[in-house]
Image: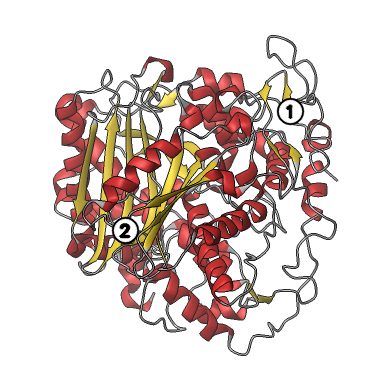
Amino acid sequence: MTDLDRATTTLAGGGADGGTGVPDPAGTLCVLIADVLGLAAVDPGQSFTGLGGDSIQAIQVVSRARPAGLLVTTREVLRSETVAALAAGARAVGRSGAGTGPARPARRFGSFAPTPIMAWLGELGGPVDTYNQSLVLRSPAGFGAEDAVRVVQALLDTHDILRLRVPGGAGAIRGGAVGAGTDSTGAATAGAAGEDAGEAGAGAAGAGAAGSDSTGSDSTGARPLVPPPGSVDARALIEHVEAGAVGDEELPGLVTERIRAARRLLAPAEGIVLRAVRVDRGPARQGRLALVVHHLAVDGVSWRILQDDLRSCWEALAAGRAPEPAPVPTPFAHWADLLRADATSGRRMAEAVRWADTLRPASEPLGGVCAADRLDAESAVNRHTLTLPPEVTGPLLTVAPGLVNGTVNDVLLTGLALAVLAWRRPDTGDGDGGSVLVDIEGHGREEITDGVDLSRTVGWFTTMYPVRFDLGLPDLADARAGGPTVGAVLRQVKETLRAIPDHGIGHGLLRHGNSRTGPGLAALGIPEIGFNYLGRFPMGDTADWAAAPGHDFALDDADEGLPMAHAVEVNAAAHEGPDGLTLSATWTWAGNAYPADRVRALADEWFAMLRALAHHTALPGAAGLTPSDVSLTGLSQADLDAFESQLGDLL
């Protein structure tokens, strides 16, 4: 048994009953999915992805199903053809061990090896101690100072990572500590490349502090650590602001000013990774609660967890009960142990050649790699935001993915890959190799082993992995018109993404968590362009604990001087407002990499291709299968296209 297996057994709960014990599982799931997707109602015969649901929202469904007594996985939510089918496979929480948590206690506290994304931040350099995300919510009328202390304390005591301490600060984190042993140069001194995690990850499920001293640091840099609940006092982390005389128009400016002040008070070395600002507007009006959390301790999925917890904590207080958020099935430290063990497993080591080939150089712009240390720092001057209207965004994000049994990412990346080819074709001509290399950010909560439930675990789980789209020379004029070309490329992009093991989590493990493979991958450079789809966010809701107007939802922020991670970066998010669904995209770039007019032209080209994809959804015969949809091996896309052409609607 490997250390990964041993660590996993601490969360495996045994087999589940055939029955759920919930009177109407399908009806319960329909209500939960409708709530997550912001829909009036959902029919059991509809599918989650067909309704426009994405992987981040699937995690929300999993999280909300648990208190309702149903245990489902993210993969099941995404892959079930109907809600009824999802309900048929649901297990009961707490019955026959299903979803009851660890057979023996999983590790929550102490030091742990940095996760790949933590190590990535440590390498980035610059003012990373203030690198944060924030969320501003509508707090209920009457939400007092003591209420704020109690709910924030409940968050701190429930979610271990909010008590994170990093000796030396965020910039001191380094990866590469896992391996068969290294000498002072970082070269491997023992072990074979194909060995599993048995020896290299020894002790991963135990204390996790082997090789570190009492300060939590070792030869490779700082080791993050988590102290027990109660060790961080919420009272010292909250600023209270009286704003009874402040109008609605001036309020966002006031809150933003206090968020900036709170950001400067973050201190990971001292265990301060959360600050809060309570804005009181009097007993009869909603106020604001702003949470500012270091990015080491939060991500987009985490904010949804915290938002739900704030609602439940306030409901408890209003009813005269103590605020007690639901328990967390898988602690963050345990997840870090699993990653540490997996980084040297045979299955991950076998991926090294794949990642090295993906990062091969190419002469075309945005087709190859660049050196990260040659990029300028981020600047507000080099930023450009565009928004697609509801009439385009609606079919783009809800209909287009269903054409190929795909995801929103498949659609957005199809548009991006085509846009890059069209943007550079005037310079490269017919000699263009047709290759586009993109660094993709994923939510990172992958089901790499059984018995792990991350639907309520707060932390920074993001994965970052390179993907090469080899598209050849597609008919770009036909693609812009929404013709068959755009559909063919959509199928090709989907299949490229499906071929990547575990949504790319292995790249970060080998690059930042394995001393044998890390240096070689680091030497290859990084893709020039990075892409991140943040998911869907409700806007315009006036209810208590809804996102407050005038503030971005969980976008990264830091003091000036933070280095660019790529030459060009795209961060996109969908917003559900009273007028429908819109897609906003913010482009940032290094000033020494590309001029502003070239990046703006690429942004316009991307939206043109997305409009073409939305138009394509209305064409007859636009839907179709791809090889990953069928169980027969050896079938090509050409074979499937031929079958569909011959059999038509019979398929």
Q: Using residue 157 as the reference point, say whether residue 240 is left or right of it.
A: left
Q: How is the image coloured?
A: secondary structure
Residue at 79% across, 32% down: 209
Residue 643 is situated, as x and y percent measured from the top left of the image, at 37, 66
Q: Quadrant of residue 213?
A: top right
Q: Which residue is mark 2?
A: 244
The span from disc 1 to disc 2 (Cα, nearest Å) is 45 Å
Q: Secondary structure at mark 2?
A: loop
Front-most of residues 385 and 178: 385
Residue at 79% across, 26% down: 214
For the C terminus, the image quarter is bottom left
The three-letter code of the residue at mark 2 reads Gly
Q: Using residue 7 as the reference point, say whether residue 495 is left or right of it.
A: left
Crowding at mark 1 (Cα within 10 Å: few <14, some 14-19, many 20+): many
Q: How many marks?
A: 2
Image: 256 above or below 355: below
Front-most of residues 169 and 323: 323
Crowding at mark 2 (Cα within 10 Å: few <14, some 14-19, many 20+): some
The three-letter code of the residue at mark 1 reads Gly
Sequence-wise, the earlier of marks 1 and 2 is 1
Disc on res. 216:
1
Residue 641 is situated, as x and y percent measured from the top left of the image, at 35, 60
Residue 568 is situated, as x and y percent measured from the top left of the image, at 31, 30
Disc on res. 53:
none
Residue 438 is situated, as x and y percent measured from the top left of the image, at 38, 36
